[in-house]
Structure formats: structure tokens, C-alpha cells
Amino acid sequence: MILKTLLVSKANYWPHSLKSSQTKPLQPEHRARRITQDKKWRTLATDRDEFPDDDIDSNQPVDINALAARLAAEAARLQSEANRIIQSSGDEDDQTNPLDDAFSFSTSSGNDPNGLPTPSSSSKNQEDDDDDFVSPFGLETKAQEADVLSEVGDGGFSASEFELLSELGQISVQQVEAPADDSPFPSTTGQRTARAAVIAYTASYFSGMPFQDPVITLMKEYLPGARAVACNELQILKHLCGMPEIDAKWRAASSALSSRPPVVELLGYFLAGPSERAVLADPSIRMSPSADTIWIVQKWEGMAPLTMYPSTQQISGFGLGRLFGGNSAAQRDRTKMLKAITAGALNAVGYVHDRGVIHGAIGSGSLLISTFNDSDWLRVVVKIDNFGFARRIIVPRFLRGSGGGSGTRSSLYPAPIPIPLEADDSPLSLGQKADRRQLAVVLFECILGALSNSGPSDFTSAESVQRILGEVFEWDFDRYRQYVEDEEEWEAVVALLSADDDAGWQLLRQLVIGNIGASSLLAESIFCEI
């Protein structure tokens, strides 16, 4: 399962639910069901062919005992039929929205070798449906969803406090249908289908308090089929960075960019009707019995997906430097920027992993950077986002270490007793290995695209790296390295990765193998020393 950020042309959208605080969510319509039920009962009352009323001659004497027996039999038949109809109607009432069931998982169904949850029986029955795609955890009833939101706490926002400014893009869920195997890493083969799940916007937040000007926030609208993804992201973000109290939300939203935590911070959430853009992306929303969608509000810091960096024209330096004889300095800035991005990505992934979380969907759209300007390599900030398919695995207390005791936040999450990662087959270890391997793919995509002589192309994309490294070479790193070194187009890539005794190659090799944690690689790798 992969989350990707797809950038689309910007447009202004103002959902009806954000126009007025008095707009109430639509209620389920019962009229059609009631009419149908009335028809059933009318049919039941008239359909009595077995004991017709007109076979009794009113002029003839009537056997009271026989008539009573016939009436008793008729009553028994009617009661049986009524029970059948009521049972049928009850089954209809118990049915949930199929869009919600598309994300349903059984919490007791166990884990696969990756430590990822396996689909429940209801999801398996729908696996042939093109609209069905899996989720990180189970929300099989509305009660469970309510429990999750109760655990997260009051979101502290209402729709009337926001005005949508522009659409940033969509996050699609991609499902890969492939035969199960014993590999703990994502499959590179099989049929892939994608479906929009989240729409991201910038929005102005009006706190309504004096001396608090409107502040721009990042807002994500989760389509009805992605409600489980929204609840999961709320839980993970609350665990990783907390959520400010109601009276502190404006201050948190307006604070300056900070490198800590390396996670796009959660401000809160609210429930409101879908936007017009959401209805266009998923017309089935109109038929959903629940009109509310989940809107998550996060801190907006002007960051953009890493996927945009290689193709962004520099305002100075790399590229333009060739025209003025300054290409050597520009090349130096670009290599330093790539090293800084690598260090920032390792720091972000390490922060998540050190807190017992598996991201599950690392991609170039999940890593955000604060600037595309190579000359700002010393100040670039890298953060990680999109935790809809993440999992938090709690390590039993008797398996934890004594903790750092440093007084830092990381000391609140003591590391497990050291176990060689190559021998650790726990769900947490296997899931984080898969994260590190996907991070290697993302870094290859970034470096190849940024240093290719002709710029980014289909050959430098994550899909190409995944296919060549994972499918063709079956994750044989040496063969993929030779493949890169044989391409004249990537001579600058080879020069960067081969410097300092192959420091770059060794770092990427360890990420592909996955047996060393991201935080340890950041601390030990010479490649990350700028």
C-alpha cells in the first residue's frame, strides 16, 4: 500500500459546510424504507389465498370450532411471515456503508509476516471489487470510530472557523494485488489500482479572539471511504507530537518554522459536510448515509513534497551557473543540499521509528522540505507526514531498556533491549525494515533526478527505481549500483555516492538491507556530515 501526493492545478473551493456554522449534517432518510415496509404489510394482509375470506357462505351455519382453528392457523402464518419481514428489515438496518467497510479489518485476524494487519472476512469478500482497498486497521462499526475519536480527544475546531484558500493536491491510495509471499517488503509486481482518499488544502483559521489575526493552516479532507485512514492518522499524530489545547491552538498555528519535531504537527480536527471537490472526486458521497467527513487541521509551514525538488528551477546556482561560469559552486551547493535532505529524511524516519511507529507508506510525497533553493542547504528542514497507514506497536515493558535518562522527550520512549535486527522478526522490526527500504528508493529517486545530466525523467522516478532494484535485480544492491555506474547520464550521481570511500553507496546499501536503524545510520554515516 503506497500513499502518493499528486499535485494538481490550484483552484479555490469553499465547501457548503464551511459557509455557515448553522449548516447541519444531513440525517439518514427513512421514508423510502417506511413506504416499502407498509407495502409489505399491506401485501401480507391481502395475500391469503390459502384461506380466502369469500369461501364462507354467510347464509350457512358456521362451525365455530373449525373457524377458530382456521383463524389460529392464519394467525400463526401471519406471525411467521411478520417475523421473517422484521428480521429482513433488521438485517438491512445493520448493514453499514460499503465505503466504510472497504477499510474494515478484523482486530483478531492476526498479522502477516510484515507485521501488517490482515483483512477481515468482509474485506475478503469484497476483494474483487474495484473500489475496495485495504486499510491500516479496523473500524468495523461507528462505535469503534467514536471510541478512536474519544481517545484522541476533542478536536477543538468547528467548520465556521475556517475558509478554504486553495487546493494543494490529492493523496491517493494505491492497492497492489499480488500473490502473498514470505518477503517482509512491499511487492513490486501485480495489478495496481489507485483511488483518491484525501484532498489537501490551505485554509485561513479565524480564532475569533482579539489581537489574533487569521493564520494559514494545512487542512486535509478525508473522503468517506478513508475515514479509517483519518482516525489512524489522528491517533499516530497525537502520539508523535501531541495536540495543543483549545486556548493554545492559534499560538501553535502561528509559531515559526522549527525542525523539532520532524513531523507535520497536528492542531486538531472537526467533522463537517464534504466539499464540492470531494463530491467530484467520489460521486458516491451523495449516496452516503453519513454526510460528515473528517477534516484534520495541521500546522502550515510552507513546506512542499520532496517529489517536486529535482524538477524545480533554481533561481540561482545549479543550472543557471553554467551560463556565468559558476557551475562548480552550484554543483557543490546541490551535493550539499542532497546530503542535507538525506540527513533530514533519516532524522524524520528515525524519530518515528524510535517511538514504536511504522510509517507504512514512505514516498517522496510523504517527506516535505522547507526550501528548494540549493544555497539554503544549511537551513533546510525535512519533515514527514501522511500517517494514514502507519501503525504504532507498543513494546512490552519487560522488553524495554532502562531509557536514556537525559531528560529529553526521546527518553520517554526507552529503546528495546538490543537485539540484532537481522535476527529480529517482530512485526515492529519487519515493518521498520520495509520503511527503510522504501526510504532508499525515495533517496535514489531524489539523487538521480537532481544530478542527472538531462534532469528528472521516467528513468529516475520512484516507480522505475522500485521496478529495476526490486523486480529486475530482486533487491541485489551491487547489481543496481553497477546499473547506475554504467549510465553516462548519471556520472554526477556516481561521483557523489563514491566520495569518501563510497560513503553514499554504503548508506543506501544499509537502508536496502534494513538491519540498521535510521537514527544509527544518521549518527554513523560520513555521507550525512556536511
Image (cartoon, helix red, strand yellow):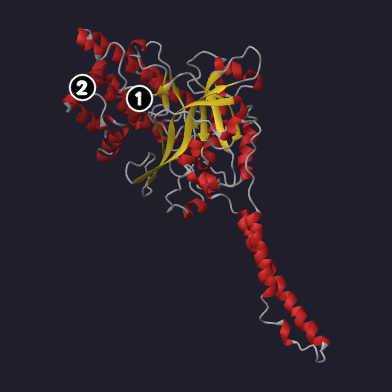
Circle 1 SS class: helix
Query: Which numbered disc flags the more N-terminal residue, 2 or 1?
Result: 1
Asked if residue 222 can be seen in this view, the reply is yes
Amino acid type, callout 1: Met
Question: Circles 2 and 1: CB distance less than 8 Å?
Answer: no
Q: Which residue is mark 1?
A: 308
The residue depicted at 48 percent of the width and 23 percent of the height is 351
Q: Nearer the viewer, residue 93 or 485?
A: 93
Are there few (<14), some (14-19), or many (20+) residues within 10 Å of tag 2? some
Q: Nearer the viewer, mark 2 or mark 1?
A: 1
Q: Nearer the viewer, residue 204 or 92?
A: 204
* Residue 439, x across and y down, in percent: 37, 29
Q: Quadrant of residue 44?
A: bottom right
* Residue 59, x across and y down, in percent: 81, 91
Q: Quote the CA–CA distance across marks 2 and 1.
A: 17 Å
Amino acid type, callout 2: Asn
